[in-house]
Amino acid sequence: MKGIKIRGTGRCVPQGVLTNQDLSQRMDTSDEWITSRTGIRRRHHCKKETLTGLSLQAAGEALRKAGVAPEKIGVCVVATVTPETLVPSTACMLQRELGLAEDTLCFDLNAACTGFLFALHTVECLLQASSRPFGLVLGAEVLSRIVNWEDRSTCILFGDGAGAVVVESREGWPSIGAVMGCVGNDRLLHVDGPGSGRPPLLSMEGQRVFKFAVEAVPRCMDQVLERHGVTADQVDFFVFHQANARIIDLVVRKYQIPAEKYYINLEEYGNTSAASIPLVLSELEEQGRIKAESRVLMVGFGGGLTWGGALVEFAEGAYGDERK
Ligand code: ACO
């Protein structure tokens, strides 16, 4: 059996920034309410940028940092619920723009905010059967296009961005041991698709999703730790889906995770759904806070309802040094 490690990361967020102050001029809300309830201060929203454009930038940076040539990619999966076009998929456009080989398996995947972890797990499995050792995994969203600006309890939460990782698959490396799941629920978090005949607007029962998250995240973490036979102390870094600082605080307190072992960037980006975990990974790699062989436990949850967790290692020398 082969396992995967992360070789390089990349990210791209749109330039346009919407602050809590900006929002308070458009609707009945305040910086104080948003910050105290969520931890969010700003979010980046696309003006001219596109989902495909953000994805291309993030993927290009990840390939450069990994030192991996595009033609060595065997699988490319983009997790998104906001593709620019349903057909072709975002991943197909990356094939053309990045110059991936024509027999690279390229497709988009929807598991809402857990999408990146579903995609990482999928890529690990598919690389078992690939003749090439590298995979490209993205989480990318333009949620500003589907938020309901009439609903102040949700529109303040979401932002746009794309994050990417290049993984390498090798015989003898540990599996990420992903734990994934879903329970079908079309009420707590809902966005209509083209088949419904209704416009795609995000609706959410925030308090119930909050309750689901504070139960699902620790359950998922425990399962990942058990699967890997490690304790929380033996994990080098924790990366949580960036939905709400209060959810992360509750989990961090429960596991007594020290401040230097986790990271919050939602004050700058808001909830970017599938992009949130790879955005964190990319910032951590850039800051040198994840070292070679670091073991990183990632946990996400979201619409579906879905949840997922995995423990991934970073590959030696995956920090922009010259390889291959
Ligand atoms: N500004 C000011 N007041 C507001 C706002 C706002 N933007 N939004 C709601 N309120 C008001 C409500 O009207 C309500 O007023 P009332 O008591 O007079 O009726 C009051 O604030 C409390 O509203 P709640 O909805 O109960 O607020 P809550 O404390 O639950 O916070 C929030 C809402 C932030 C959405 C929270 O429930 C949450 O974060 N839930 C988790 C959501 C989540 O993580 N979703 C993502 C998961 S999946 C994915 O990533 C897509």
Image: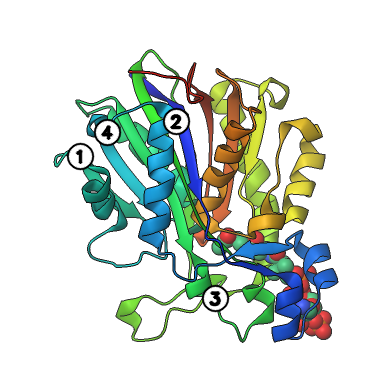
> For residue 73, which numbered disc appears in the image?
4
Q: In which quadrant of this rendering is ligand 1 seen? A: bottom right
Could you tell me if the residues under marks 4 and 1 are in contact, i.e. CB atoms within 8 Å?
A: yes
Q: Secondary structure at mark 1?
A: loop
Q: Is 161 positioned to the left or the right of 267 in the image?
A: left
The first of marks 4 and 1 along the sequence is: 4
Q: Secondary structure at mark 3?
A: loop
Residue position marked by numbered label 3 in the rendering: 147
In the figure, residue 34 lies in which quadrant? bottom right
Residue drawn where x is 37% and y is 25% of the image: 168
The first of marks 2 and 4 along the sequence is: 2
Could you tell me if the residues under marks 2 and 4 are in contact, i.e. CB atoms within 8 Å?
A: no
Residue position marked by numbered label 2 in the rendering: 65
Instruction: Residue 42 in the image: state x and y as whole percent.
Output: 69, 63
Q: Is 95 positioned to the left or the right of 33 in the image?
A: left
Could you tell me if the residues under marks 3 and 1 are in contact, i.e. CB atoms within 8 Å?
A: no
- The response on whether ligand 1 sits within 8 Å of label 1 is no
> For residue 104, which numbered disc appears in the image?
1
Q: Secondary structure at mark 2?
A: helix
